[in-house]
Every structure is written in structure tokens, then in C-alpha cells.
Amino acid sequence: MKLSEKIGLITGGANGIGKITAKRFLEEGATVVISDVNEQAGIEAVNELKHYGDITFIQADVSKSDEVESMVQEIVSNHRTIDILINNAGITIDGFLTSMNEESWEKVIAVNLSGVFNCTKAVVPVMMAQQSGVILNASSVVGINGNIGQTNYAATKAGVIGMTKSWAKEFGPKGIRVNAIAPGFIATEMTAKVPPKVIELMKAQTPLKKLGKPEDIAAGYLYLASEDANFINGTILTIDGGLIM
Ligand SMILES: NC(=O)c1ccc[n+]([C@@H]2O[C@H](COP(=O)([O-])OP(=O)(O)OC[C@H]3O[C@@H](n4cnc5c(N)ncnc54)[C@H](O)[C@@H]3O)[C@@H](O)[C@H]2O)c1
């Protein structure tokens, strides 16, 4: 097992990629804490996954630094440490720039960008104290290539790449590796909101001619979290069927 005795925190872990990553981590022997703003979904996810191993749920909104701080304190008091942080929580509020209001801009920045800042800031001192840790951030191909109707989302996912590389430099000397995954289009609730004709276009533009599955991204997180990736730091791993290259 690749993650025996590791304690992992996955934000936004109640659904989609986060939930499937939690399952994969449990299968590899990790103790997993999922956090999510959606309490009902978090409880359901734990009920669904508890047969795979030690999993608990803490409700927290990543955009609220006080909630993030108390979540991290609770994990440390229950499990002593955090070895792996996956900054997975994310939202979209799409629209053309001309119709995108300030609220849509700020909400997406608050969750996708400030959320990553808040969680990493709260967890890093724990990792520094033990001189080891892995931080994995959810970027997107949209943060590299841009996308029509996703000004706010693309800004956050590009920002996550900047934070990933900065932290890889800042925390590498402390034994903490920081990497990101940039998924292409993955079949989850997030992409279920995308109009079918856009999905068909994305499939057509992808050399593998299909959407990815949450399992494809979970496999990437597992690899980057494991000792197999012990010399990988500051990388942005695209998992997108060849959509961008
Ligand atoms: N699905 C894709 O095609 C795709 C592509 C590229 C990147 N991503 C990124 O991967 C991550 C996961 O995406 P997904 O498709 O699984 O999404 P999803 O919508 O299925 O799951 C996201 C989870 O985050 C939670 N969440 C939302 N706001 C939160 C907050 N403020 N605090 C805590 N939790 C919050 C939601 O409740 C939900 O459980 C996101 O960061 C997303 O941007 C997804």
C-alpha cells in the first residue's frame, strides 16, 4: 500500500474528484479526512466510503479562514498531524465577461483562490514541524489555455499554478513537495452544468475523444502523494486526454 500511516485532508471531498480520490487513498492505507461546505453530502460520502478504511468528515467552508483554522486544529488533535493536503474544493460561476457581475467574480476567487491560500497557510506549519508533507492543488487546463465564459475560473486556476510554483520553492527546503493537477474535462457534477454541445466540442478536440473520469484524476493525486513522486516538486500535471499540448 502506497499511503500506509499517512493522514490526508481532501477539501471539497464530498463529491466528484475529491470523493473518488478519498476512496483511492483509503484503498492505499491512508487515514482520510474529507471537508466540504455541504454537510449532507459529506455525511453521505463518509457512509459510502467507510467500508474502505478510516474516513471522517468535517464541515468547513475553505473561503472562511476561521473555519479552516478550526478544521486543521481538530484534525491535528484527532490524528496528530497532516501528511497530505489536497486543495480540491472549487466552484464555477460561468458567463461572458460583459455579463459577469462582481459577485460572481468575488465568489469564485474566494473559494478557488483564497480557499487554497487559507488551507495551505493553516496546514503548512504542521508539515514544517515534521519536516515533511505533500500539498496538491486543483488547477485546470483552463488555467493554462483560458476558456470562453470562464474569466473568473481561469484566473483562479492560473493563480493556483503561480501559488504551486511559489510554494514548491518556498517549502521544498523544508521537505514539503507542492504540485498541481490540471484536469481536462472530467465527468462530475461540475461539468454536468456545461451545455451538451460544449461537452461534444471538448470531446471532439480531445485526441482520446472522451471525457475523463474522476478515477483518472485520483490516480494522479495518488502518484503525486506517494513516495514514487519523491523528486517531483513544482510540477503541473495535465491529465486531459491530450486536449492541450
Ligand atoms: N470536473 C472537471 O472537469 C474539472 C476540470 C478541471 C479542474 N477541476 C477542479 O477539480 C476540483 C473538483 O472538481 P469536481 O468536478 O469534482 O467538482 P464537484 O462540484 O463535483 O465537487 C466540488 C466539491 O467542492 C465543494 N465545495 C464547493 N465550495 C466549497 C467551499 N467553499 N468550501 C468547501 N467545499 C466546497 C462542493 O460542495 C463539492 O462537494 C475543483 O477545484 C475543480 O475546479 C474539475
Image (spheres, rainbow, N blue to C red):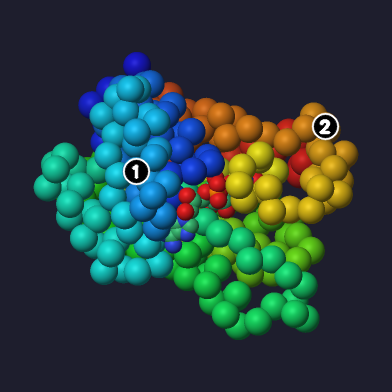
Can residue 12 be seen here? The reply is: yes
Residue 43, numbered circle: 1
Q: Quadrant of the C terminus?
A: top right
Closer to the camera in the image, 27 or 52:
52
Instruction: Residue lying at the far top in this picture: please name it.
Output: 1
Q: Is label 2 or label 1 in front? A: 1
> Residue 145, position in %: x, y?
74, 56
Q: Residues within 10 Å of mark 1 (few under 14, many from 20)?
A: some
Circle nearer the N terminus (2, 1): 1
Q: Is residue 117 left or right of residue 57?
A: right
Q: Is residue 9 left or right of residue 212?
A: left
Q: Is residue 20 left or right of residue 35?
A: right
Can residue 11 be seen here? The reply is: no
Q: Name the residue type under label 2.
A: Lys
> Residue 133, position in %: x, y?
30, 41
Closer to the camera in the image, 117 or 152:
152
Q: Is residue 236 above or below residue 106?
A: above
Q: Name the residue type under label 1.
A: Ile
